Image (cartoon, rainbow, N blue to C red):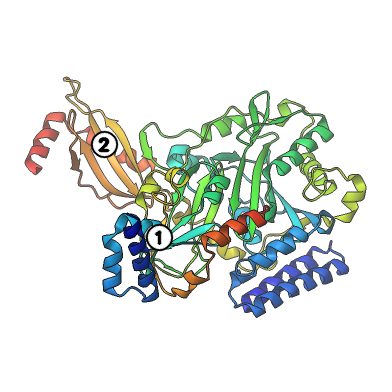
Amino acid sequence: MSILLRRNSSQLHLLQRLGAASSAAITRLASSTNDNNNVTDTATTTTTTTSTTTSGNKRKTLAAVADADIKKSVFISQSSDIFTNLALEDWLYKNFDFGHHHVLLLWVNEPCVVIGRHQNPFTEANVSKLMERGITLARRNSGGGAVYHDRGNLNCTFFTPRERYDRKYNLNIVTRSLFREWAIKTEINDRDDIVIANKKISGTAAKLGRPNAYHHCTILASANKLHLGESLVKEPANYISRATASVPSPIRNLVDVNRNVNVPQLLSAVGYEYLRTAATALEDGGSTQTMKQRGFQLINPTEKWFPGIEELRANYSSWDWVIGKTPKFTVEKELEVKGDERGMKLKLNVEVEAGLMSKICLQLPQSEQLVPVVTPLQGQAYNEQNLNAIMGALKLVSTSNMQQAMNGSI
Amino acid sequence: MVFITKLARVGAQAARQLRATPLAASQCRSFHASCMLAKERRFTDKHEWVELLDANKAVVGISSYAQEALGDVVFAQLPEPGTELKQDDECGALESVKAASEVYSPVSGKVTEKNAEVEDTPALVNSSCYEKGWLFKVDLKNPAEFEKLMTEEQYKSFLSSSSDH
C-alpha cells in the first residue's frame, strides 16, 4: 500500500512540478487515483493489484472512458543520455496511470546503438569498435531490431493502457505531422516501418504489459548516415544464435527529402499533431482539441522528479543488462595456421553464455570433434577483441604441431 | 472405449477431490490417453492457461486467443527452474513482430521446468499452444488459486463478452 501511495504522490509531485497542469487537473488526478486506492483496499494489496486482480473492473471502466475524457500530454525529455531516457521510459511504463491521460514522450540521444530486448549485440554491431568510437551500446526493454541514434534522430514513445495500444494510430500521427508540416508523403509498410519510396525513415518496437503498454519509434531527420551504416556492421565471423535478428533496410533522412527538416521543428510538429488528434480515433480536432489537452511539458529525468529512476538507469547501463542478457550463442571463425599447404583449415568455436565465454574449442578439418583450448580467457567476457586475441595466439601454431598436441591430449 | 473414458473421468475427478492419493493418481496415469480428454484447463483474464498434472504440479501456457493476437512468436524468454513466483508476477516474455509481451504467472509456486523446445522453436507457441507450446511447470504453493481461475466455458464467454482487450 505504501508503495502505491508513494507512486500516487510522486505522480502528483510530478504534475505540480511540471507547472503546466492546472490545479483542477491535479485534483482530478488525485480523485481518480483515490478511486483506484479504494478498489485495491477492498481487494488485497500488492503493487500490481490495481491493474491485475481488479482488471475485470478496470476493463469496464476503461471501455467506458470516452475519448473526450482522455487528456493528452507531450513530454519532452531534457536528457540526451540513452540510459537516462530508457530509464525514464521504463519509469513511466511501470508507475504512471495512463487510464485518463495518454502521453507522448519525445527524446533525442547522443550517438548510440540500441538493440532489442532479445538481441545479440555481437550480431548487430561490432561492440569493440563501437567502444573505440565512443558510440554507446544500449539494450532496450521492447522487442524488435537494432537502431542507431544520434542528435539527428527523434524518438517518440506513445504510452497508453494495454487495452488502448494501437500502433497504426501512432504511426499515422507521425505521417500526418510530416505531411502537415512539410507536405512530405510517406507510407506505412507491413512491418510498421514508415517509408518513402521503400526507404525507411522510421522503425518501430513495442512493449506490452499490464496495465500499461508503449510503442516507440525512431524518426530519421538528419542522422549521420555514415556512422549509422558503420555502426551496424558485425565482426566477420559465423554467429549461431536464436536471438531476434534485425531486418536490415535501406534508410533515408527526412532532410534529404525536404531540406527544411530539422529535429526541433519535427519535435514540435509531431507533438502538435498528437495534441490536436482525438485520443483513439484519427480525427483532427484542430486548435480546439489542442486547447483541451495538457500541452507540452519539459521533463527533467532526475531522482527528485522520478523517485527510483537512478536505480533503473544503473540497471540499463550495467554490463549485466547490456551484454549479460544476450541469449546464449556460439561463434565460429576459421583459423589460418602456418604450414597450411594441404589446405587444412581449423575452426575456432566459442560458446558464450550470459555474455561469458563458457567453452573455447578447436574443430579439426574433416572432423566434427571439438577439442577444448586451454586459455586464461575462458570464463571472461566475450567481445571481438578477445576473439581476435585467441585467434592471434593460435596463429603461431602450425597444423602438424596442433594435430600432434591434440593427439597427445586425447 | 466409452467405458474406459468414463472410468478415467471418474479417476481424474477422484484424484482432484482426494488431492491425489497415490492410488487415484496411478489409476489416472494408467488411462493416459483418455485421461488427457478429461484433464481440466483453467484460464486467466490475461489469456494464460493452467493445467494440473497432479494435485500440486501444474503446467502453464498461453491461450489460442493470445497466440493469435501476438502473431508469429520469434523469441521466448522463460523463467528459470527454481524461480519462486507469486500469482501475477511477471515471469518472462514472448516476442513477436517487434513487440515484447510480458508473461504473467497465473499461479504461485516454484518453477520446476521450462520448455526448452519452445526456447529453441518459439513458433511452437503458435502451432500448438495447448500441447507442445507449453511454457513452464510449477509446484503449486496455493492450489486454491487454480480453483478460482476461469473454466474453459467461463473463458469462452469472457472472450465473447469483451471484444476490447
In the image, taking residue A94 as reference, residue A299 lies left or right, namely: right
Residue A21's place in the image compared with A120, above or below, is below
User: Which residue is outermost to the front?
Assistant: B3
**Position of residue A272 measured from the top left corner of the image (x, y, whole percent):** 83, 45
Q: Name the amino acid type tagged 1.
A: Ala
* Label 2 crowd bin: few (<14), some (14–19), many (20+), radius 10 Å: many
Q: Does the rendering let one see residue A116?
A: no
In the image, taking residue A277 as reference, residue A405 lies left or right, namely: left
**Marking on residue B147:** none
Q: Which image quarter holds the C terminus of chain B?
A: bottom right
Q: Does the rendering let one see residue B83?
A: yes
Which residue position is annotated with label 1? Answer: B38
Which residue position is annotated with label 2? Answer: A348
* Label 1 crowd bin: few (<14), some (14–19), many (20+), radius 10 Å: some
Disc 2, SS: strand
Q: Which image quarter holds the N terminus of chain B?
A: bottom left
Chain on which label 1 sits: B
- C-alpha gap between disc 1 and disc 2: 52 Å
Disc 1, SS: helix
**Position of residue A373 measured from the top left corner of the image (x, y, whole percent):** 20, 44
